[in-house]
Structures are given as C-alpha cells and as structure tokens.
Amino acid sequence: MKNIFAVALGVLTAIGGFVDIGDLVTNAVVGSRFGLGLAWVVLVGVVGICVYAQMSGRVAAVSGRATFEIIRERLGPRAGLANLAASFLINLLTVTAEIGGVALALQLATSVDPGWWIPVAAFGVWVVIWRARFELLENVTGLLGLTLIVFAVALFMLSPDWGELAGQALQPGPPADEPVATYWFYAVALFGAAMTPYEVFFFSSGAIEEKWTEKDLAKSRLNVLVGFPLGGLLSIAIAGCAAVVLLPAAIDVTSLSQVVLPVAEAGGKIALAFVIVGILAATFGAALETTLSSGYTLAQYFGWSWGKFRKPAKAARFHLSMIVCLLIAVGILATGVDPILVTEYSVVFSAVALPLTYLPILIIANDREYMGDRVNGRGMNFVGQVYLVIILAAALAAIPLLIITGAGA
Amino acid sequence: MNDHHEHDPGHEHDRGDEQDAGRRMPRRDPRAPRGRVLDAHLHLLDRQVLDREGVPVTTVDDLELDGIELGVRIQPGSPPPTLAAILTGPQLLMRLFGGHAPAARRIAIPWKLVSEVGTTVRLGVDADSLDASWVERWVSRHLIGRIPGGRHDPE
C-alpha cells in the first residue's frame, strides 16, 4: 500500500493536467468528432511532460529550489512577471472551472442544482488547503481519482471494433467533414493541457513539501513515469469511449452527462457510480492543485514564505492569496458562466506561459551551481530542446487557431 | 533599470551574456573554495533570501552600492564600491518600470546580516527581526492568525 502512496504526487499532478474538468469534456469532444485521430498528440504530450516534470523534480530534490524561484532567478523580474501573469490567469481560470466541475459532479450524484454546490465546493477546497497535511491531500484525491480507470474498463466492455480504433489512431489527420484548423486547434488544446505549466509548479513545490532530497531521485522518476502515462491513458480511454458510442450516434458533447454516457451504457449503475466518484475526486484534486499552484507561483516570485508544511500563520501571504483566488473563482461562477468554457480560453495564456516556464527549467537543470554533478545528460538535453521547439510552435499557433476556429466550434 | 547601479564596474555583463558568463566564470562548483567572483546580476539579483532558520524572507529585488554616485563618471583609480544592502519592497517596481525610490521608502536588509551566498542568500538573523518582513507579519497577525486553525500545524 505504501508504494501506491509513494506515487500519489505524480498521480495527482497528472490528474490535474490530463483529466480535470476541461480535459474530461475536451477528450470526449475530441473522441466524438475525431475518434482516436488525436491520440498521437496525447502521447507526444505525455513524453514532454515526463521529460520536464522529471527535470523540475530533480532540480527541486537536488537544489531545494522550486520551479518559479528558478523562473524569476533566470528570467529576471520582467519576463518572470509576464510568466507569472499568464500562469496565474491559467491557474485562476482553472480553479474557477474545477470548482464549477465539482459542483457539476455533485449535481450528477444528487440532482441538486450546481449553483447550490459552488460555495460548498469552494469552502471544501479551502478547508482542505487550510487544515489537511499535504500527504493526506495528495493520497486521498490521487487514490480516489484512480477510479476514473473505469473509462478504460468501459472501453473493453463496449467490445468495440479494435481494428477501426487502431485505424483512427494510426492514420491521423482531420476527417473529411471537419476543417483542418479545427483539428489542429484541438491538437494544440490537448498538447497544452498535457504540458500545462501548473503541473511542474505543483510537482516541484510538492517535492519540497515532501522534503525530497537527492536520495529521492528514484522516487521522483517513479512518480513521473507512473503518474503522467496513467493520465495519458485515461485521456485516451475517455476519447475512445466517446469514439465508440458518441461518434456513430453523432452526439455533440456539450455537458458532463454526455461524457459519462458511454460508461453508463457499458457498465450500468455501478460503473456510473465509479465514474462519478472519479470525476469528483479528479475535479476536487485539480482544484487543490491549481489553487495551491496560484499560491506557490506568487510566493516563489516574490520570495514569500510558503508551504503547507508550515502553520498558515507562518506562510500568511501564501494562504491569503489562495483565499483571494477562491473568492474570485466563486465570484466568476456566480455570474453564471459555463465552467467548462472557461478552461478553453486558458489555452491563450499558455502561449506566454509555456516557453517561459520550460526554458528556465532546462537551463537550471544544466547549471552545476544548482545541480552539482546531477546535471542533465546529453539525451535529456536533446529531448528537452526538441520539446522546446514543439512548445514554441504550439504556443505561437494557439491564439490564431483559437480565433480562426471560434474555439473549436 | 539602473544597470551601472547594480554592477561592479569591473564586471560588466548584461542579461544576454549570462549563459556565456557561466563559461567565463573561474569556477562555479558549489564545493569550490571561498573567495570566488560573484556576478551581481547572475549570482545575487532575483535570488531567494532565507533567514537563519531557512524561512523565506524576500527575493533580492535590487542591491544598494556604497562609494559610487549615480550619474557621475567613475574616475580611473577610484576605490571599488562596496555592497551596502539588499533592497526589496517598492524597489521591485523600480526594477520593473525604472526610476528611483526615495531613500525613505526603501526597505533594506544590511549586507552585514548576510551569512552565506549560494543558490540562495542566507541571513544570520530571524526574519521577524527585519523591517523587510513587516507585511508578512501584518497579514499573519491581523488576518490569517485570526482565522480558526491558523496558528496550528496542519493535520
């Protein structure tokens, strides 16, 4: 059992990246429109986030410095502030969406209007951040989030035509009835979600919360190699379920109930219960991850005291900023905006945040002052640089694609 | 940003040179003996400042140099300037947008309190004894410390 908990940080980090509320819906939308035609993007994203999360975890374990401290130190105050602004907006929009997502999941379970659940969800997130130990928080949400594996089980129970699914996955490209730009918009959205910057902020800060040292490098690697591929697998399974059930029926995915439809069809009420627990845990976990990430990034840029291993009064500005974030999130949701739509626009801010996040990690991972002889090897540097080019391309394409396609409409 | 304000005139580097600076530095190994050359821009500015117990205090937002007059040409043979203090608070805005904060508004940590310079700048005193941490203390005392559970360890 202890071994499962050892990878909780990686699992929770990956859940926030791959199957948070926005991605749950995006994956189902992609599956219902392109089948598994974008599965390759998820694979590319998994490798990329593994490479950079491992680097950020290694830097945190060896030097004791979390990712945003490094960003400020290497980029200086101005470019650091640009990244902070973009990353913070991504965090804030995602916190908003996740709290809305928790409310939607509770609505699925209880049929009570989500408007009533929003303040409850936000208060729940705050209480956990205020009082629960970091290990408790990551273990519970990480483990319960694993029930989303029911999507993979459901895919098998639907006994699909595997040859057709493999055909979709191996011959990528937009289907005849979809514009090319829309296909690439979703490709960038999936890639951006896989490599979303709050994952490395959370992972590296979590490593410091757990007080990792050079001895924990194997643990860091295990977390990365279990967590992110699992996230990718869930992401593809959701798309697969949608491809089998929703694509032939030409159902347009617009809500959470359509995302879980294939699971209910395959496994009935029991599977549905599992998937609701999974979605609840995943959205709640992602809400914790993004709320904490907002606190981590602000505190690390300005050099404030931070961390859940301290009493709140000993990391006062860190806790205050998270309370303010949650209040803003509730305020945004009170306007009645669709929480799922909110995450789509965070792609825009990724354009600034992605390159400015990953470049400093790559530089510091090669700096002997920080890393001693634990600097990157040649292979790691090569892959890291290839991914910087991909990240830059995706970042530059994000905004034009968003405008051309009207956010994938 | 006042570049000449932050630099030892003998070591002019700007941001663009930083990666090269790594190679030109004599030794950057953390186990290297004392007395190494520090580039103010690369090794001090924007690094985390920790107190005696390892609690984060601030980031090095700027540095104050003594023995150098702003806007005055440095005569050859004049004595090198010395580091007087780490500046923080409103000084960050000056770095971001340019200009000078009036001396009375500066929040300074005297350089003599610094005990160690590595990947972080360590101080030999507690954060609570510094002017630089007054905002943290204020928020802690008046807001966060008043919420139930705020003064307890997480469970």
Image: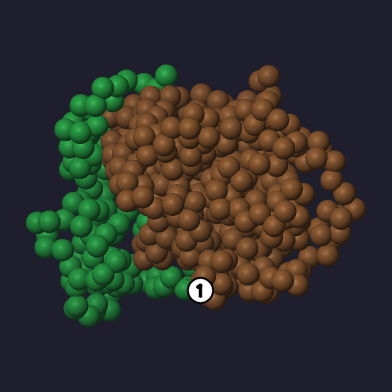
Residue A214 shows in the view = no
User: Could you tell me which residue is drawn at 48 percent across and 39 percent down?
Assistant: A104
Q: Where in the figure is residue A105, as x and y percent of width and height? A: 51, 36
The part of the image, by quadrant, that contains residue A77 is: bottom left
The residue lying furthest to the left in this view is B104
Q: Is residue A275 above or below residue B84?
A: above
Could you tell me the amino acid type at mark 1?
Answer: Ile
Pointer 1: what residue?
A403
Q: Is residue A24 left or right of residue B95?
A: right
- Where residue A170 sits in the image (x, y, percent)? 84, 61
Q: Nearer the viewer, residue A338 or B29?
A: A338
Q: Colour of chain B?
A: green
Q: Position of residue A304 (x, y in %)?
A: 32, 43
Task: Say which quadrant the C terminus of chain A sits in.
Answer: bottom right
Residue pictured at 40% horizontal, 56% vertical: A89
- Seen from the viewer's position, the closer of residues B34 and B58 is B58
Is residue B133 in view from this perspective? yes
Residue at position x 17%, y 68% from top?
Answer: B100
- The colour chain A appears in is brown
> Relative to B62, is A293 on the left or the right?
right
Residue B130 locus on image (x, y percent): 20, 40
Q: Chain of mark 1?
A: A
A311 versus A202 height, above or below = above
Q: Residue furthest front?
A: A249
Residue at horizontal 28 percent and vertical 29 percent from the top:
A313
Secondary element type, mark 1:
helix
| Res A119 → quadrant | top left
* Quadrant housing the N terminus of chain A: top right
